[in-house]
Amino acid sequence: MKRRHFLMSTGAAVGLATAGLGRRALAAPLRLTIQSARYDLTGTAPTEGMVSLSPDAPPPVLRLRQGERFVAEVVNTFDDYTTMHWHGMRIPVQMDGVPYLTQVPMGQGDSYLYDFTPPDAGTYWYHPHCNTMAQMALGLTGILIVEEPEDPGFDADIPVNMRDFRLGDDGQFIAFYTPRGAARDGTFGAVHTANWQIDPVEEAPAGGLVRLRLVATDTTRVYKLHLPDAEGRIIAFDGHPLNQPLPWPTADAPLILGPGQRADIALKMPAVEGAEIAVLNDQPGGLRPVIRLRASGADRGRDLADLRPLPPNPLPTPDLSDPEVIEFVIGWAPGGPPANDGYCGSLGYTFWSINRVSWQGDASGAGPLATMERGRTYILRLRNESPNDHPIHLH
């Protein structure tokens, strides 16, 4: 099955499963099974020991609707403890998949019912939040799309799950992380994929308008992206529509996406059938294509001006009249004992510090980094004193 057909079939299936949940009683929850998988990532041999939601395919694109109820029973058949986290979504904390805070991790054979109504439309993703780094490295990262109530008017919607895999020459997993890599910018994978494919090509209507959803689900890589000779604009970032447009990415000023970040791009496809648009990533060793879009069929003659602006999400407005500023300084760790094991595993070492105190693990009994008052506005000022990139997000 071609990758684009897989995306269309799984996206349609999950969309049908969740359509109308806010308008009628739920007949049965969507069942998602975390399980061992095998998949041919390199074209040489299937990679064994992967983790997905099916035995022989990438995690599917889940499509929900803004303001409509979503219920999923997540079943764990994998031989490790895990939870499911819905990254970037403003949902009740009980549904957020935080081990030992909002739920007990699921052991093999356990299940958990996630039940929430997404308040915001946009591009999000899902991943485990127990033994997180290892299970993500094995493949368990998928895209979650919350669709707007009204069709924004695109001819095609193409999600792109960007991530690496750490594989040897035989196509099998090697060590996910090394101390040398962890002490620098991270341990990079050598197999670069989009939607679990190397240099994939997706077809889109010639002269049509495409919503390209770029999602960085890699645990390490910071993407530096541009689309040469393409006509388009960035319409949303990290799930939310932009009030003001971001500059169009170029080779000299690329679009930066760190782990967990997302960008929605409105593209006009070339009018000539067979012409291509490439999304390029600037990485050590030079530019490489992440994905290519190939024009297909007769020219639809669309124009970017045809698109209606995306409606804003109902985000609260912070009170900036008297905010408290809290500063966090990121740097290398001073000398000290190695990190303790966490509640859900750890790398066994730490090279980094916050406010010059090394993090000893969530099972160490360390106090909070800050204490805040509910309802008050805070500004978090983060300063990186190291020479390395540090993608950071808040939960």
Image: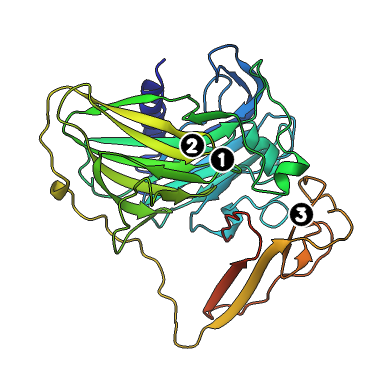
Q: Nearer the viewer, residue 261 or 9?
A: 261
Compared with 232, 192 (above or below) is above
Which mark's residue is nearer the viewer, 2 or 3?
A: 3
Q: Which mark is residue 218?
A: 1
Instruction: Residue 114 in the image: state x and y as whole percent.
Output: 56, 46
Q: Which mark is residue 351?
A: 3
Measuring 18% from the left and 35% from the top, which residue is drawn there?
208
Disc 3 is placed on an element classified as: loop
Q: Nearer the viewer, residue 326 or 142?
A: 326
Q: Is residue 157 left or right of residue 95?
A: left
Measuring 81% from the left and 49% from the top, which residue is drawn there?
349
Observer able to see residue 105: no
Q: Earlier in the sequence, mark 2 or mark 1?
A: 2
Q: Nearer the viewer, residue 124 or 171?
A: 171
Instruction: Residue 234 in the image: state x and y as whole percent.
Output: 31, 51
Measuring 72% from the left and 46% from the top, which residue is drawn there?
182
Q: What is the three-letter code of the residue carrying label 3? A: Phe
Q: Badge 2 is on which residue? A: 162
Kindly indicate whether the residue at mark 1 contacts the one at mark 2 (C-beta within 8 angstroms).
Answer: yes
> Pointer 3: residues within 10 angstroms few (<14), some, or many (20+)?
some
> Pointer 1: residues within 10 angstroms few (<14), some, or many (20+)?
many
